[in-house]
Image (tube, rainbow, N blue to C red):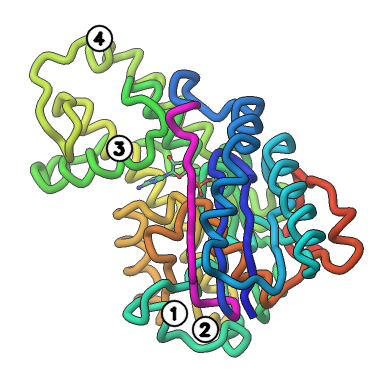
Amino acid sequence: MNILGIETSCDETAAAVVKDGREVLSNVVYTQIPLHQPYGGVVPEIASRAHIEKITQVVGDAMKGQSVDAVAVTYGPGLAPALIVGINAAKGLAKSLGVPLIAVNHIEAHLHSPFIYDSPDDAAAQLSDPREIGPMLGLAVSGGNTVWIDMPEYGKYEVIGETLDDAAGEAFDKAAKLLGLGYPGGLKIDRISAAYRERFPNEPLVPFPKGRPRDGVTALAGLPAELCVSFSGLKTALLRHVQQNPSLVESQEGAQDFGGYDVTPEVAHVVASYQEAIVQAIADRTRAALRRSSYKAFVLGGGVSLNSRVRAVLTKVCSAAHVPLLMAKPKFTGDNGAMVAGLAFYRRNVSGDAALCADASPSLQVGLA
Ligand code: KG4
């Protein structure tokens, strides 16, 4: 069964055709990053307009030469004006093609991304049917979400931990802005940090806070405190550090190439320290989450899951816990239509006539329907 997946929840206009939930036959992603760069973040109105301008071309390119048996679309969570564009395109297309429409959850789709492949050599191509693996622990970590999810069986989801404020990607992006590295910051911080640590492997890092709950606090927002994370203290600590060391952002003297970016060794040191705090916060909560059940796999998806240090540290965490780590192929970590089409083969949050009436759900919870 070939499903066309459409994704417009944030700043990527994306569409893909996926066979039987796993094999990616086409995958088209138009990223709007250059449009949002001058504003240092995603502007919903600009995102919506750009989706409108690009959706026909992106979907047309994804469908070229493919037969389509159903159309799937993300209906939340995400930016309402952006979601609406994909939902309306999907409704029109499903009607005109005379095929069913399926609406799915964006976070659940990120957790399907480790199962999709576009080459027989991909690790995902060797995996068994996700319905045969369970229970699984999932982590969706992106610009909009940082959430640990218990999946007792495939298609059943319960949030067991999450960020109490910013998502990890947001924490990366805000730090990059503060340090004058531009938007988005995740990839730059990743590359600068890797280059710095290679050049100065023994240099102690700035001990930025790791977002842990206060001693004695056992529950936060109705979730176990050991599985919750907060990045606001880390951001404040970085701001204070910059205020106490204004030359960090005022002078470029002595800048050198770190991972393809010209920054001073002092800035690279702060960047690597900041990244390490985020990575250790994620690793710490993952370790605690893995202790809660005898998981058969840990699935990792979302834009931040591309981070080389996140991948390396979580590989060690999973290996110590004897739980296989299933990571999305780099090209499927960020928002894409293939994860939407893939998930829709297994799970239909909303389908049939209800899907044709589905509305954008900006704060959609996982595990509904
Ligand atoms: O999944 P995604 O494309 O969109 C959302 O659903 O948010 O994730 C985008 C986020 C941005 O915050 C970006 O800075 C971050 O992922 N990101 C990274 C890396 N590549 C992208 N963060 C850390 N390291 C990376 N290599």
Q: Mark 2 points at which residue?
A: 296
- Kindly report which numbered mark, 1 or 3, lies closer to the viewer in this rendering: 3
- Under mark 2, the amino acid is Lys
The spot of residue 249 in percent (x, y) is 27, 15
The spot of residue 101 in percent (x, y) is 78, 64
Point out the tag, 4 or 2, that comes first from the N-terminus. Answer: 4
Ligand 1 image-quadrant field: top left
Q: Which contiguous range is marked in magenta?
A: 20-35
Label 1 environment density (alpha carbons within 10 Å; few <14, some 14–19, many ≥20): some
Label pair 2/1, CB-CB below 8 angstroms: yes
Q: In this view, does 333 lie to the left or right of 338?
A: left
Label pair 4/3, CB-CB below 8 angstroms: no
- Foreground of the two, 256 or 171: 256
User: How far apart are the two marked residues, 4 and 3, measured between alpha carbons?
Assistant: 19 Å
- Under mark 3, the amino acid is Lys
Q: Name the residue under label 3.
A: 188
Residue at figure coordinates x 66%, y 79% from the top left: 154
- Under mark 1, the amino acid is Val
Point out the tag, 1 or 3, that comes first from the N-terminus. Answer: 3
- Kindly report which numbered mark, 2 or 3, lies closer to the viewer in this rendering: 3
Q: Is residue 136 left or right of residue 298?
A: right
User: How far apart are the two marked residues, 2 and 3, measured between alpha carbons?
Assistant: 33 Å
Q: Mark 1 points at which residue?
A: 323
User: How far apart are the two marked residues, 4 and 2, measured between alpha carbons?
Assistant: 50 Å
- Foreground of the two, 162 or 260: 260
User: How far apart are the two marked residues, 1 and 3, measured between alpha carbons?
Assistant: 30 Å
Residue at figure coordinates x 44%, y 73% from the top left: 117
Residue at figure coordinates x 79%, y 46% from the top left: 361
